[in-house]
Amino acid sequence: MNYWLMKSEPEEFSIADLERVGTEPWSGVRNYQARNYMRDGMKLGDGILFYHSNCSPPGVVGIARVASAAYPDPTQFDPHSDYFDPRSPADAPRWLLVDVGFERALRRTITLDDLRAQAATLGDFPLLARGNRLSVLPVTAKQWKHILSLE
DNA sequence: GCCAACGTTGGC
DNA sequence: GCCAACGTTGGC
């Protein structure tokens, strides 16, 4: 079992949206490192910290689970989609996604400030690294446990 | 809305 | 393969 953190802008897709739909294909990831985590790292049932970005306050707001193996993101082939990628070959899709399943909302937001205050305990945590922009990133079992203990 | 950080693109 | 230009992310 591996653990991850996935960012979403709540105005685009919030934890409440995930609760409503239950399971969501995580379309639109257009970063190779994030794609590689989904393709090579994620296994069915892995834990996901659901993080709200580009809002106030940013932070972890819920828990989700990896609900599928990685498969091609259909939006890359849809000319009407914001995520259309005309350079992705149909027979070798460039972009993959996984389905993300709702588990629960946290009782409170564990804010970015809360996480920064725990930097010493969390150790090497890419979310807190300078200039970090990855929308999908790994979390260790120890970090997972410690972060959720802050709830 | 600003802007620092960073990934990608494309000319050479 | 270098690197300047450009677009995007995301905190503030």
Image (tube, coloured by chain):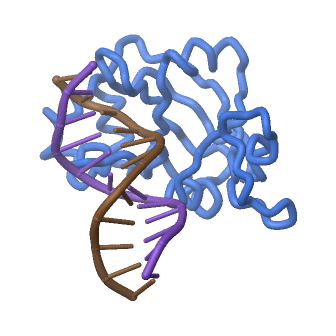
Chain colours: A blue, B purple, C brown
Image-based side of A143 in relation to A104, left or right: left
User: Which of the two residues, B4 or A3, is positioned nearer the viewer here?
Assistant: B4
Image-based side of B11 in relation to A85, left or right: left
Residue A54 in the image, given as x and y percentages of width and height = 37, 25
User: Which of the two residues, A56 or A1, is positioned nearer the viewer here?
Assistant: A56
User: Which of the two residues, A134 or A64, is positioned nearer the viewer here?
Assistant: A134
The residue at the point 57 percent across, 21 percent down is: A13
Residue C2 sits in quarter:
bottom left
Q: Is residue B11 above or below residue A46?
A: below
Q: In this view, does C3 lie above or below A36?
A: below
Residue A126 in the image, given as x and y percentages of width and height = 31, 51
The residue at the point 80 percent across, 44 percent down is: A74
Image-based side of A137 in relation to A98, left or right: left
The quadrant of the picture occupied by the C terminus of chain A is top left
Residue A102 in the image, given as x and y percentages of width and height = 63, 25
The residue lying furthest to the right in this view is A91
The residue at the point 80 percent across, 66 percent down is: A92
Image-based side of A52 in relation to A68, left or right: left
The residue at the point 37 percent across, 45 percent down is: A133
